Image (cartoon, rainbow, N blue to C red):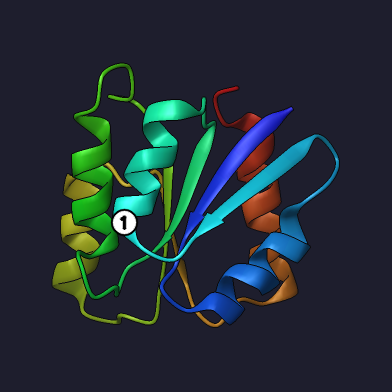
C-alpha cells in the first residue's frame, strides 16, 4: 500500500484531499504543520508528499528541500498545491525540482491528476 503524506495548515483542505485520494491501495497520513511532517518522514516510508505552498512555519518548497535532505529521501516526489500566481515562485519550484505544481482550487480534473501521479510515485 502506498503511503501519501498531506501537509496543509488548513484542516478542512487536508480532510477533503484525504477523502478524494484515499483507497485503491493508497493510505493517507495528514498533518497540519511541517514539524509533524518531519516526524512522519523519519518513521514511515512515504511514496509521495502533497503540500500546500503557504504555511506559517515554512512554505512547501522549503519543506520539500528540508525533507529531501533527510537520509534516503533525496528523490522523494512532492506535489505543491497553491493559489500563488507569481511566475517567479513557479520558476523557483521548477528549478528546485518540485515534482508537480497544481493550482488551487482543486477540481475533479486536478484530483484525477493527483491520483494519476500517485500511481507512478515511488512505493
Mark 1: secondary structure? helix
Dividing the picture into quarters, in which one does residue 47 lie? top right
Mark yes or no: residue 112 visible: yes
The residue located at (77%, 51%) in the rendering is: 22
Q: Quadrant of residue 78?
A: top left
Is 26 displayed left or right of 48 in the figure?
right
Q: Residue at x 34, y 26 (%)?
A: 75
x and y, in percent, of residue 99 in the image:
39, 43
**Looking at the image, which residue is at 29% across and 53% down?**
35
Q: Position of residue 44 (x, y in %)?
A: 51, 28
Q: Residues within 10 Å of mark 1 (few under 14, many from 20)?
A: many
69 lies above or below 61: above
**Is any atom of residue 77 visible in this view?**
no
On the picture, is 66 further left or further right than 38? left
Residue 74 rendering spot, x and y as whole percentages: 27, 24
Q: Percent from the top left, x then y, of residue 55?
A: 29, 73
Residue at screen point 44% across, 39% down: 40
Answer above or below: position of 112 versus 64. Answer: below
Residue at the limit of the structure toward the top, as seen here: 72
> How many numbered circles are shown?
1
Q: Is residue 23 left or right of residue 5?
A: right
Q: Quadrant of residue 8?
A: bottom left
Point out the image quarter for the C terminus: top right
Classify the position of the N terminus by image quarter: top right
| Mark 1, residue position | 34
Amino acid at each position: 500500500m502506498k503511503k501519501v503524506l498531506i501537509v496543509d495548515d488548513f484542516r478542512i483542505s487536508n480532510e477533503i484531499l484525504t477523502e478524494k485520494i484515499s483507497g485503491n491501495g493508497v493510505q493517507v497520513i495528514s498533518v497540519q504543520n511541517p514539524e509533524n511532517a518531519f516526524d512522519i518522514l523519519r518513521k514511515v516510508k512515504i511514496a509521495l508528499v502533497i503540500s500546500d505552498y503557504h504555511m506559517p512555519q515554512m512554505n512547501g518548497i522549503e519543506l520539500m528541500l528540508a525533507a529531501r535532505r533527510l537520509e534516503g529521501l533525496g528523490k522523494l516526489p512532492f506535489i505543491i498545491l497553491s493559489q500563488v500566481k507569481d511566475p517567479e515562485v513557479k520558476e523557483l519550484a521548477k528549478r528546485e525540482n518540485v515534482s508537480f505544481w497544481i493550482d488551487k482550487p482543486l477540481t475533479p480534473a486536478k484530483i484525477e491528476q493527483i491520483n494519476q501521479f500517485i500511481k507512478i510515485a515511488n512505493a
